[in-house]
Image: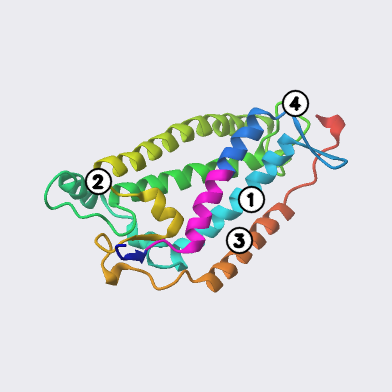
Amino acid sequence: MSEKRLVWDLPLRVFHWLLVLSIAASWYTAENSEEFLEVGTAFYSYTEIHFWLGYWTLGMLVFRLVWGFVGPRHARFSSFVTGPKKIAAYLRAFNGPDYKPAPGHNPLGAWSVIVLLAMISAQAITGLFIIDNTEIYPAPFHSSVDPETASALATFHFTNFDVLLWVIGLHIVAVVSYWFVKRQNLVGAMFTGRKPAAMVAEADAIRSSSLIKALIVIALAAALVWLLLQQAPPPPAFEDY
């Protein structure tokens, strides 16, 4: 078996797959917002669950933002966010003899990560201000903005998610293309964290996943989201809707 070297730390990999599940669950609960989940004798509206998923996703995004500055090498934004010149050079070399696989994110894939994180962040933030179609379940900060602003944010929320699905689709197409064209198993690497030594120089590999640091960042992200939700104004009486 060929030697493999650690590139993606465990917290980053867990974040990636939890984010995938969260987006899928958010889509499902939004599409079925009038249904309920029965747990024993309790019933939970899918709209309520959708909001909870939004808070969860917001916490994960806070974690990723902080982890992008304090995490291991390839998790840091400074290690993969590049300018247009490097992107152009990467594209020119893609089908040529000078092509070298990036140990972490390649210059083009790096910006797709930034775009995805920005769009998902916009989705989570705008979701704090909207209300469901039945006008029964207002988001925490819905009453803090005027109806016109809430309506505009809701329109953005719905449109942004439709565009996000297309961007995710392009992301999947790119991952599949790398498998067939360059024989790079990007999905497997995001599960194991490791890539073949032929693709990753020893100096580019990371030594550990920095789990203790990750736990501290997770606690910080959870505390920040909790504090944010504590600042929400009390919801108006039901009759006001």
Tell me the SS state at disc 4: loop
- Tell me which residue sits at (59%, 50%) in the image: 58
- Tell me which residue sits at (42%, 68%) in the image: 72
Q: Rounded to the nearest whole Å, what is the CA distance between mark 1 and mark 2?
A: 35 Å
Q: Main secondary structure of the magenta part?
A: helix
Q: Which residue is mark 1?
A: 56
Given this view, does label 1 or label 4 mark the residue nearer the observer?
Answer: 1
Q: Rounded to the nearest whole Å, what is the CA distance between mark 3 and mark 4?
A: 31 Å
Closer to the camera in the image, 224 or 177: 177
Q: Is residue 103 above or below residue 49?
A: below
Q: Which mark is residue 134?
A: 4
Sequence-wise, the earlier of marks 1 and 2 is 1
Q: Is residue 25 above or below residue 134?
A: below
Give, as a three-letter code, the residue at label 2: Lys
Sequence-wise, the earlier of marks 3 and 1 is 1
Q: Which residue is mark 2?
A: 182
Residue 73 appears in the rendering: yes
